[in-house]
Amino acid sequence: MSLIHVTSKNFEKALQAAPGVAVVDFFATWCGPCKMLAPVIEEAAEDMPEIQFYKVDVDEAPELARSFKVMSVPTLAFFKNGELVKKNVGAVSYEELEELINSVK
């Protein structure tokens, strides 16, 4: 499984180490929709080893949330070769996540 919790200190390094597509889940521990999305992200991380999945707790890394203009959680940010290419706000199903990933490949 390729699901890594990152902070402001290791975010850039982690993203640089992820060639291809990476998905960053900006979440908060108190957020209901984030809790609904968590198992979807975990399942996708197991099923898609070619994709790097990261989780960022916005309460622990508010500067990261600000830098990516995350105004609501959960927000999924999709990166390709280290560049932000798409964002999606709100919980999604596994199928919707798969479609989002395929749209940035």
Image (spheres, rainbow, N blue to C red):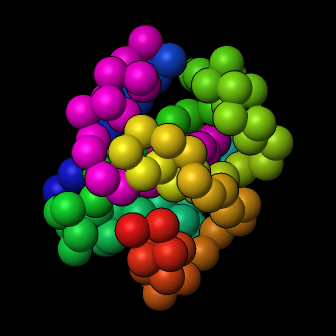
In this picture, is 28 found above or below 76? above
Write the residue at 20% across / 62% down: 50
The magenta segment is 9-28
Near-viewer residue (81 or 15): 81
* Quadrant occupied by the C terminus: bottom left
The reply, left or right, for residue 39 in relation to residue 51 is right
In this picture, is 38 found above or below 61? below
* Quadrant occupied by the N terminus: bottom left
Q: Quadrant of residue 66?
A: top right
Q: Give the percent coordinates (x, y) of residue 54.
A: 39, 44
Q: Quadrant of residue 12?
A: top left
Res 54 visible = yes
In this picture, is 26 found above or below 97? above
Give yes or no for residue 87 being in the magenta stretch: no
Give yes or no for residue 22 being in the magenta stretch: yes
Residue at the extreme top: 9
Write the residue at 57% across / 68% down: 36
Res 53 visible = no
Q: Give the percent coordinates (x, y) of residue 100.
A: 53, 74
The reply, left or right, for residue 1 in relation to residue 60 is left
Write the residue at 42% across / 25% down: 11
Number of numbered discs on residues: 0
Q: Give the percent coordinates (x, y) of residue 8.
A: 50, 17
The reply, left or right, for residue 16 in relation to residue 91 is left
Residue at the extreme right: 71
Near-viewer residue (78 or 41): 78
Q: Give the percent coordinates (x, y) of residue 43.
A: 31, 71
Write the residue at 65% across / 56% down: 87
Near-viewer residue (28 or 87): 87
